Image: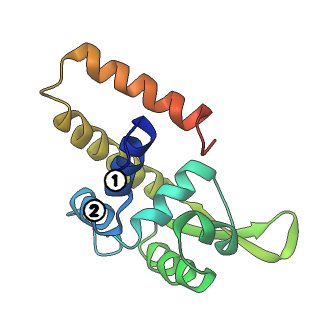
Amino acid sequence: MESGVGHEIADALGVLLKRSNRLELYRRLTDGLGEAVDELTYPILSALARSGPRSAAALAGDVGLDRSGVTRRASRLEEAGLVRREPDPEDRRATLLALTAAGERTVGTLRHRLSAHIEAGLATWPAGEAAAFARNLQRFVSEGPFA
């Protein structure tokens, strides 16, 4: 059996990134936020909040769907008033997906819920360890192998 810190991190990331774990987390976070906001549309809202307006094709790679999958989910969010389509200033034939004010408020609620969920999971950790973990995780993201 392999050992070492790289293997330990890879195993932990495998659990965190497992699709079933993500879907269950998204279900918890979106509970009660309306019919359009669920585990399938959460990644669209989250990605738009991180990136700003983007085309469905550009968003597809970030959320692990093809363009038509993004478009279907974005249409649900648009009907609910959370996403709008706007002209792409760089390509008059294309449109961008963007959060509306209501979409931004919904993302704020989702981020608050996620933060509370994470903090609850760390509640038994000594404060110094939790803070060090947060700093080191941020460093890993910004300087590590996926930067």
Label 1 crowd (10 A; few <14 / some 14-19 / many >=20): few
Outermost residue on the left side: it is: 124
Q: Residue at horizontal 59%, vertical 86%?
A: 68
Relative height, residue 118 to residue 71 (above, below): above
Outermost residue on the front side: it is: 1
Residue 98 lies left or right of residue 135; in this view the side is right
Report the amino acid beneath label 1.
Leu
Q: Secondary structure at mark 1?
A: helix
Report the amino acid beneath label 2.
Asn
Q: Front-most of 17 and 98? A: 17
Relative height, residue 8 to residue 40 (above, below): above
Q: Residue at horizontal 21%, vertical 63%?
A: 31
- Give the residue number, with chain letter if any, for mark 1: 16
- Give the residue number, with chain letter if any, for mark 2: 21
Percent position of residue 12, x then y: 34, 47
Residue 110 lies left or right of residue 138; in this view the side is left
Q: How is the image coloured?
A: rainbow
Q: Secondary structure at mark 2?
A: helix
Percent position of residue 134, x then y: 38, 27
Q: Quadrant of residue 20?
A: bottom left
Q: Front-most of 145 and 1? A: 1
Percent position of residue 146, x then y: 60, 46
Outermost residue on the top side: it is: 128
Percent position of residue 123, x then y: 15, 29
In three-dimensional space, the C-alpha distance between marks 2 and 1, rounded to whole angstroms, equals 7 Å
Q: Residue at horizontal 53%, vertical 66%?
A: 63
Q: Residue at horizontal 47%, vertical 78%?
A: 73
Q: Mark 2 touching mark 1, by CB under 8 A?
A: yes
Q: Is residue 33 visible?
A: no
Residue 40 lies left or right of residue 88; in this view the side is left
Q: Front-most of 51 and 61? A: 61
* Quarter of the image with the C terminus in it: top right
